Image: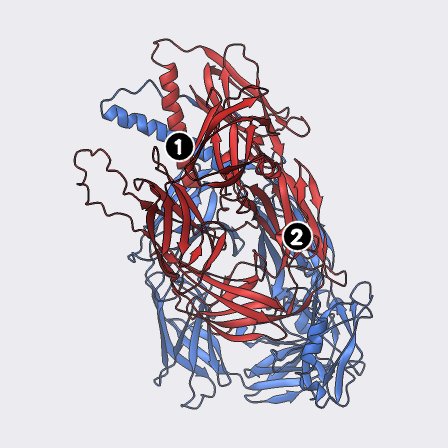
Chain colours: A red, B blue
Amino acid sequence: MAVQRGLRLAAVVVLGYLCTNMAHVGFGQTPERCLLSGAVLNSATSSAIAHVLVSYNGPSSGYRFTDLGGAFRAGDVPCGSYLLSVSKPGFVSAESLSPQFSSIFAPSPPGGDEAEQSSSPPQPTTESVDVEPGSPPARIQLVPVSSIAGTVLDENGEPLAGVAVQGIAVRQSLDGTDYAPVRSNHTDDRGAYAFLDLTPGDYIVRLAGEAASTRYFMGSRLYLNNDHRGMQPVYYPNGDSPASAAVLHLGPSERASIDFRHATEAAFDIDGRLTGIAPGAWTRVQLYREGDRLPVGAAYVNLSSGQFRVVDVPRGSYTLRAVQYVADTQKWLAAETQVVVVSQPIRNLAIELSGGADIPVSVSYEAGADDNGTISLSLRPQHERSNVRHVLVGAPARPRPRLKGTPEPGSVPEPPKAFTNVIPDRYRLNVQTIRPNTASGYVASAKLGDVDVLHGEFSVSGSAPGELHLTVRGDSANLEGQLTFKGQPAPRARLYLIPTAGGGSDVKSGVSGADGHYQVPNLPPGEYRIQAWRGSPTPAEILAKSGETLTLQPGEHRMVTLEAEPAKAQPQEEEGDL
Amino acid sequence: MRGAAGLLLALAFGGSTPAQCAASYVVGGVVVDSRSHAPLGNMRILLAPSSARDRKAERVTKQDGRFAFPVSEPGKYLLSITKPGYPLQFYKQTSLSGATTAVVVNESQDASHLVFEAKRGGVIFGVVKDEDGEPVRNARVTLFQSAVLSGSRRMIPRGQTRSNAAGEFRFPNLLRGSYYVLATGSAWFADSISGLEEAQQFAQSRLEVLAEQGREANGPPPKFSPDPAFRGAALQPMYYGNARSVEQASIIRLETGSEVQASIILPFTRAVALKGTLSVPDEASEGRVVLFNRVGDQFAVFMDTWVAKDKKFQFVNVPPGSYIIVAVSSAASATSGWGLDDEVEVGAVDAEVMLRPQQTGSLAGRVLFEGERPAPEASLFVTVHGEKTDFRYRAEVNPEGSYSLNRLQPDRYEVTAGDMGYIAAYLTGPSGERLPLTLSVSSGEALHRDLTLTRAASAIEGTVEKAGVPQIAAFVLLMPKDSSRQWAYRIDQTDSDGSYRLATIPSGDYFLIALGESEDVAYRDSKVATRLRQAAQTVHLEPGDHLTLKLDVVSAAALNLSSL
């Protein structure tokens, strides 16, 4: 880990070095000497922060720690432009609070599973400064983290030790609300848990009960001293799904105290055998309660015999998912099966893992669609979130200008036009037409068998679901016009087109140029709500505002002038085009 | 679910115990806190026959702390309890030895008015900080107990935990005793600083490449300036009591149910990188490499990393010190895997190590018998257990009376043998000297040791009394007169009727003593043994003897053993 991170940093620094050399060297002069200094402050209290790591990179490079007064100084550096990178545990950068523009359409899945405790180094805040003779010290603000802590008691008021509590970040995107588990903690002997270093934002808390990573065992018998008690998972205060949970709005340095008092009930073990497994491969067995998106269950698996046991499962209907990832062949194996726990253990469940199905992808073009476009498809699983698949369809990539010694065209095999090794899961399909450039066309439907999966979620089970067929139509609409603010042309203002059907998904957007003019081509015909914004609105702001309704006919070219509304978030200059 | 009360469960299990068919006895009573004597509600109680410990019945106490198990058959039963704050413990459990007091169920015993004095678990908690007062998150905190086990005082690992983002750690459910705490960690900025340094080296090497190609570099590389006050990116491992070694560390004396704070400050120290290669022929396997701190004769995990098929690994931000390095393949079986280890001394500069596979060793010899031989058809096995690798090897004694264990990883092994009323007594060296049952096998060594077994078919049983009253939970100890016969010690703890039983004893001369208020006694310590002998009675056992002896309890406090 450390090595990789170091190498990535290395690349950044070298780039910076080459660039700054171009800017500063070559005049044949000795650069003037300057003082690089500054102070790091807590954004919530304006007090100084000591022992902050400040590294600088520019005409020279190095690092300093702030003193007890929050100040740092590097004397006698060449004057010029520097990039400061500022980090300290317990603090995050101000940018991490507002959603990144690229993530407001669909939040990127969190990398891997939630951590018991975050151990990665603090994310730095970066800031560029121009160091001139006599320039004032830099002032950098860091945002203090928030926390959630509490205790879990049972129906008798006794502490519940060893039960899982999860902190789930609530992230709004135009694709809907996403719930990303970011922290998990098992209660201690006092029933206490704590999430101590949360980026300020919106959270919900789930008492998951018996939930742990899958543990492995050897031998043919598993001796456990579990007490056959369990609990129904609950979203604070007493919801059964993320949507029914109370959302905690945590500002910088705020601490929320969230206590649970929750009855335990009789619980039962589920045991059986996984067949068709890759012995020794990474394996996970989890239960998904009906209607809940997050798993429960503490499972033990023997990686050679496939024997497994899930312990202390309370009554309910579940989907049991068993997943393997074989690193050598980069192949997934999985199975899903329904289990209903009523009043006794479930024994000798036989679960056959399989490599899932292959889904070939084809495209047809209608209504004058240009078949020179390339369409990027990604299949995003909702359970195995790291298992995202990408396929490019449409016209083959144009041959690039060849360098000497590179193979003849045609000798490079085309990437397969199919999703392979698609294991049982719930999926969302993301479609982007990436090279229509001047051409026109939009994806009108994506049929998997008889079902249009272009919008919303769909299930893939173990059996072959058939072909995924895209229909691209050429009768798209175009929107063009002027964005204004207080009657004046508004440069770099944002425009959003939200389809009134489809629950807010598939939002289109555009940005005005320096003269306030905008153009959004290749729009599927239909009814939209249209909004214009100055600055960076949050997904919540976009979804909350109604906007004017507009119906675009097939092939229509519409001119619309719109007055932009200021977004609450600060206007951000650095963001480029979409 | 750990620690949850089990009311419904008790009902559900009630039907499956034989109790309801023909319950003629009751095991019952009240659970109270050992210090306050207040009844304890919501206590999970388990009862199992001592001969079939997995046939458990379970109850949960109400607020009055009372419990009752109907039992259909007379016999000996083991009673245990647990609840959050109270670690799993047996009735009258006083020691770590594993000896327990069984509840005797028969016509003459009243087992329905037991008072189970539950010992609340103690807690050692604290905060790990660096010398700037910043919490060290994700620090490894290791707990050791200095305790008497099998008659000798030794260091016993009691667990390792990780500190949270506030540097806090907590070890709950501890028994009364003496503890040491070791904390290790890495500075929060360690990865960032090594990233900056690597970037600097990368830029430098890039310039060198350009220069070699005869291309003009755009001037010298930017000057890199570390903080002049930088004290190092590694953290010095420290014991509680501001000590760098366990010898200098402070003992934490924990009483039943008490909570003791043991915060630790880790000073910054210079960090170096430790690179390594495994020299193993096998190309396909991967594994794990672990760096250990040595704590007395025990080890604490300090850092670990994965070693891929190229057999190279690296630890960064290692503070200078001496370590044990162990590499184990992920297919860790005695025959197909590899397990390499070495001691490394890390100084002030980056270091490289090559871990070489040690040649496996072997152990072979004749099996001899002290006294009577077993019937020729009896099958006997010799087993050795490696301390570091935890590998076990087992060989059957052949009809000619010899054994042979091959492909032993270099390690220190404990030798056991027996069954059929025989136990391993001692090994014999090349010149006929008697050797203890532990031996080290080094790389490529072919050891020849005869193993002498002794018949251990004698037994002593009886009751322990004080002025005619049976004593519950007294500690009964049988010590060989010849203390070099290390295999011949036997212990028991008296049951609820005051009875004890010592079995599989080799013939010979012994001291026998019953101690009251039995804490763990370091009976193999020569000073302790001398005092015990003075108060003990002597016993002579012939092969196959079954003696019944009534013992008078001796007060352990009166012997003043703790002063030694």
Near-viewer residue (B375 or A186) = A186
**Callout 2: helix, strand or loop?**
helix
Three-letter code, disc 2: Ser
Residue marked by disc 1: A10
Near-viewer residue (A508 or B314) = A508
Residue A525 appears left or right of A209: left
Three-letter code, disc 1: Ala
Residue A217 appears left or right of B14: left
Query: Between tags 2 and 1, which lies in front?
Result: 2
* Mark 1 neighbour class, 10 Å CA radius: few under 14, some 14 to 19, many 20 or more: many
Which of the two labelled residues, at mark 2 and mark 1, occupies the earlier sequence position? 1
Q: Are marks 2 and 1 on the same chain?
A: yes
* Mark 2 neighbour class, 10 Å CA radius: few under 14, some 14 to 19, many 20 or more: some
Whether tag 2 and tag 1 are in contact, CB under 8 A, the answer is no
Q: Position of residue B208 (x, y in %)?
A: 29, 26
Residue at figure coordinates x 39%, y 47% from the top left: A377
Near-viewer residue (A211 or A432) = A432
Instruction: Relative to A180, say whether A140 is above or below.
Output: above
Q: Chain of mark 2?
A: A
The mark tally for this picture is 2
Residue marked by disc 2: A244
Give the position of the N terminus of chain A as an image quadrant.
Answer: top left
Q: Position of residue A444 (x, y in %)?
A: 41, 46
**Is residue B92 something that shows in the picture?**
no
Instruction: Relative to B77, say whether B443 is above or below.
Output: above
Residue B204: name its quadrant.
top left
**Is residue A495 something that shows in the picture?**
yes
For the residues labelled 2 and 1, the Cα–Cα distance comes to 46 Å
Q: Position of residue A173 (x, y in %)?
A: 55, 41
Q: Chain of mark 1?
A: A
